[in-house]
Amino acid sequence: MGLTKVIERVFKRYLPSPFTIAVLLTVLTIVLALIFTENTSDKNHLAAVLSYWENGIWNNDLLVFAYQMMLILVLGHVLVLSKPMERLILGITKLVKNTSNAAVLVALPTMLVSFFNWGLGLIFGAILARKVGEYAQANNIPINYPLIGASGYGGLMVWHGGISGSAPIKVSEAGHLKSLLEGISNVELLGQLPETISTSLTVFSYWNLVLFAIVTLSIAITVYYLGKRVSPSSVNLKEHKFKSVEKENLEGAEKLDYSKIAATCFGVLILIAFLLQYLPALKTLNITPNMLNFFMLGLAIILHGSFKSFLVAVEEAIGDTAGILIQFPLYFGIMGIMGSSGMINSISDFFVSISTTVTLPIFTFLSAGLVNIFVPSGGGQWAVQGPLVLESAMQLGVPLPKAVMALAYGDQVTNMLQPFWALPLLGITKLKAKEILPYTLIFMLIGSLVYIGGLLIL
C-alpha cells in the first residue's frame, strides 16, 4: 500500500494536467530541435522550427484522425447509455454472491467489451462496477469495492490491441503510413511501405488473439483469488440512475424526435449502407476507423430507439472528448517539429544502433509505456511515436505489424499506472485513485509479463 501512496503523491505533486504536459512537451521539443538539428531552410532556425510546428498542428490528415478518435469515444459511451446495455448491466449484477465472483463478473465483460471499443469498455466497466456495489449494498453482500472498481478499469489494458486501437486501426487505412512518414523517411524506405497494414495482421492475428486471451484469463483468475484474500470494505452509494427521456405533450414534428419507427428505419439504413460499402473489407478482417464509427452510429441509434434518446446520450458523452479535441493538435505540432527538423531520423538511428530484430519490439514496448505516462492518449502517442517506430522497424527489418502492436501493448499496459483515463471511472464509482492502484499495479505487472513474453516468443 505504501508504494501506491507514493505513486499517487508523485502524480499529484509532479505531473500537471495532461494539457499542461502537452504544452511543456511542445516547448521541450522546440528547444531540442533548436539545439540538436541543423537549419536547412532559408529562414532563421527558430522561425523554421515554429513553421514546422504550425504545419503539424493543422495537418489535415491528422485532424481527420482526431475527429475519428473523438467519434470512437463518443459513440462507445452512447452505446453504454442505451436501454439494452442497461438491462445487460443490471442482469450481470444479479449474479453477484461475493467479492471473488463479483470481481470476475466485472473484469471479464469489461475486457471483452473494451476489445471491441475502448470508449464503450471504459464507461461500461465503470457503470457495471458501480451497479455491483449498489447491488451488494442493497442485499447485504460483503464485498471489497475498490477491487471491483479496479476490475472495471481492466479493459484499458487490452483496448489498444483491440478493434478500436488507435495505432492498428489507423494503419489499416489506405495512405496513412505514407502520409505519416512523408518528408521524414528517404525515398527508398517510403517505397518499401505497404499501402496499409490490415487489421488481419495486427488485431486479428493469431498471436494477438492468443495474448488477449491469456491476459483476460490471467486477470480474471487474479481478481478471483484476490477476492478470496482481501477484506470487505464499506459501501455507501446512492443509486446511479440511467437517464430516461420523458414523452410529454408532444406536438407536430416533435413526435418525430421520439419515434421508434423513424430511429429504427434510419439506423437500419445506416447498417445496410455499411454492409454495401464495407462487406469486402469485413471479409478480409480489415477494420478502419470510418468503418467502425459508421457501424456504431447505426447500432447506437437503433439501440436508443429514438433520435431524442440518442442525442441526450451524445450530450452526456461529448464531455469525454475535451482532451482529444484540445490536446491532439499539440501532439500533431510536436510530430511536425520532429519530422521536419530531422529529429525522428536521429532518434530512430539511435534505436537501430542499439537494437536487433529481437530487442527492438521490446524497446518499443518499454518506451511506449513510458511515453504513455506523459501522453495519456493512444492516438496522440501514435502521432508522436508512430513515425519513429515505423522508421526504426523498416531500417532493422522488423515486421511492421509486430512493431505497431509492440507500441500498442506498451501504451495500454501503463494505463494501469496512469490515472488520466481512470477519471471517468472514479467519478462514477466514487472511488479514489489510491484505492484501486494496489490492484491495477498487479494487473500491469501481469500484463507486462504476458506482452513481453509474447513479443519474444510469438
Image (tube, rainbow, N blue to C red):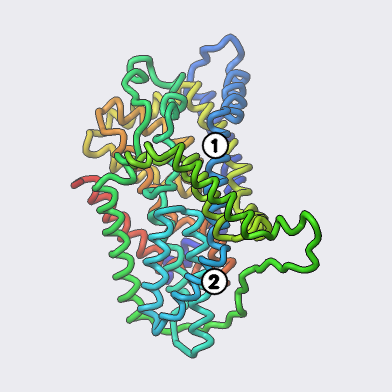
Q: Residue at x 49, y 59 (%)?
A: 122
Q: Residues within 10 Å of mark 2 (few under 14, many from 20)?
A: some
Q: Residue at x 30, y 59 (%)?
A: 215
Residue 278 at what x, y percent from top left?
Answer: 43, 38
Q: How many marks?
A: 2
Residue 404 at what x, y percent from top left?
Answer: 35, 39
Question: From the viewer's perspective, is residue 198 above or below residue 312?
Answer: above
Q: Residue furthest left?
A: 457
Task: Specify the amino acid type for callout 2.
Answer: Leu
Quadrant in which the N terminus appears: bottom left
Question: From the viewer's perspective, is residue 203 above or below residue 303?
Answer: above
User: Which labelled disc corresponds to residue 76?
Assistant: none
Element carrying mark 1: helix
Observer able to see residue 13 = no
User: Which residue lies under the disc numbered 2?
Assistant: 431
- Quarter of the image where one finds residue 325: top right
Q: CA distance from mark 1 to mark 2?
A: 31 Å
Q: Residues within 10 Å of mark 1 (few under 14, many from 20)?
A: many
Observer able to see residue 403 = yes
In the rendered view, does 184 fall on the left or right side of 219?
right
Element carrying mark 2: loop
Q: Residue at x 41, y 51 (%)?
A: 412
In the rendered view, does 437 fall on the left or right side of 198?
right
- Quarter of the image where one finds residue 213: bottom left
Task: Specify the amino acid type for callout 1.
Answer: Tyr
Q: Residue at x 45, y 81 (%)?
A: 94
- Quarter of the image where one finds residue 203: top left
User: Which residue lies under the disc numbered 1?
Assistant: 331
Q: Earlier in the sequence, mark 1 or mark 2?
A: 1
Residue 102 at what x, y percent from top left?
Answer: 40, 77
